[in-house]
């Protein structure tokens, strides 16, 4: 009996050491995988609050900005406009108007290139150039970056991280740039995406992507009315990000 007890304690000790070693290997692998993955974009915030962030990526379509701003006012919604530097430099008064109407202005790069085809240094140049233009016009420094085409390769993500930016993607895409995107289809993609895509994304904490297009202007009042009727509040991206759990940068 004594020998059995002694061997059992020894076995337990060996098992405990083995478990610790295995845990050490596991956490080392997890840390290595995280570091290898690099910075990650945010495409949705985990929250149970009924809040949504509307983002508008702008590199053209200045003629539709006033209509979008009016629709947002009427729908009691705030939005975040990601501007390219070249567009902002050509339309400083519209940039000021967006800000004056209570919306957020952020960074969409300068010339709308494919970030995945650029080096880290070239992506940094795109972001910094736009940052300076926005700051010169608004007096505010941008801190969020929406990569053109939604590309999320390592060079663009690393460039944004190096400059202290958080990369932003989206949860719900209006795909309003396509010629076949009618106001009805655009509205459906946001209010009832399950009908078109066969899925039902969670709207709480969602980020909506749109662009300044004629059909977007027509669809926006319907979208806002629908979201308001569902009890959602449309807020600035920075307000939504404050709800992001600490240490969690993905949806």
Image: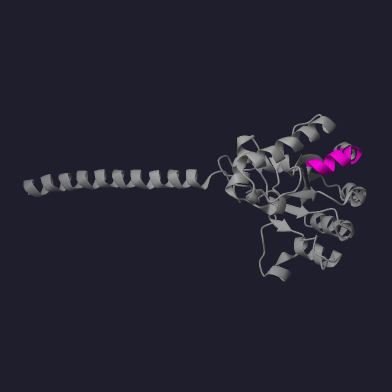
Magenta segment boundaries in residue numbering: 85-95
Q: Quadrant of residue 243?
A: top right
Residue 138 on image: x %, y %: 83, 32
**Residue 203, located in which quarter of the rendered image?**
bottom right
Q: Nearer the viewer, residue 57 or 128?
A: 128
- Would residue 39 be counted in the magenta stretch? no
Residue 8 x %, y %: 15, 48
Left or right: 135 in relation to 16: right
- In terms of secondary structure, what is the magenta stretch mainly? helix
Residue 23 visible here: yes
Q: Position of residue 111 (x, y in %)?
A: 76, 45
Residue displayed at 72% across by 65% down: 193
Of 62 and 80, the residue lying toward us:
62
Tell me, yes or no, if residue 98 can be seen here: no
* 17 shown above or below 207: above
Residue drawn at (44%, 43%) of the image: 31
Side (left or right) of 176 relative to 148? right
The total of numbered circles placed on residues is: 0
């Amino acid at each position: 009996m004594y020998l059995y007890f002694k061997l059992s304690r020894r076995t337990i000790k060996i098992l405990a050491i083995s478990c610790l070693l295995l845990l050490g290997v596991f956490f080392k692998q997890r840390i290595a995988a995280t570091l290898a993955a690099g910075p990650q974009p945010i495409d949705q915030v985990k929250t149970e609050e009924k809040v949504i962030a509307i983002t508008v990526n702008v590199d053209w379509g200045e003629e539709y900005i006033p209509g979008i701003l009016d629709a947002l006012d009427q729908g009691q919604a705030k939005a975040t406009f990601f501007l390219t530097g070249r567009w902002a430099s050509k339309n400083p008064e519209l940039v000021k108007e967006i800000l004056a109407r209570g919306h957020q202005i952020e960074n969409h790069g300068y010339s709308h290139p494919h970030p995945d085809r650029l080096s880290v240094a070239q992506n940094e140049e795109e972001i910094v150039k736009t940052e300076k233009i926005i700051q010169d016009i608004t007096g505010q420094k941008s801190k969020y970056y929406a990569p053109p085409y939604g590309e999320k390769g390592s060079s663009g993500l690393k460039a944004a991280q190096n400059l202290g930016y958080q990369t932003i993607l989206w949860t719900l895409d209006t795909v309003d740039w396509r010629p076949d995107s009618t106001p009805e289809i655009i509205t459906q993609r946001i209010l009832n995406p399950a009908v078109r895509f066969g899925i039902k994304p969670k709207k709480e904490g969602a980020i909506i992507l749109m662009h300044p297009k004629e059909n977007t202007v027509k669809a926006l009042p319907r979208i806002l009315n629908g979201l308001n009727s569902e009890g959602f509040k449309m807020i600035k991206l920075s307000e939504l990000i404050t709800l992001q759990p600490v240490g969690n940068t993905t949806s």
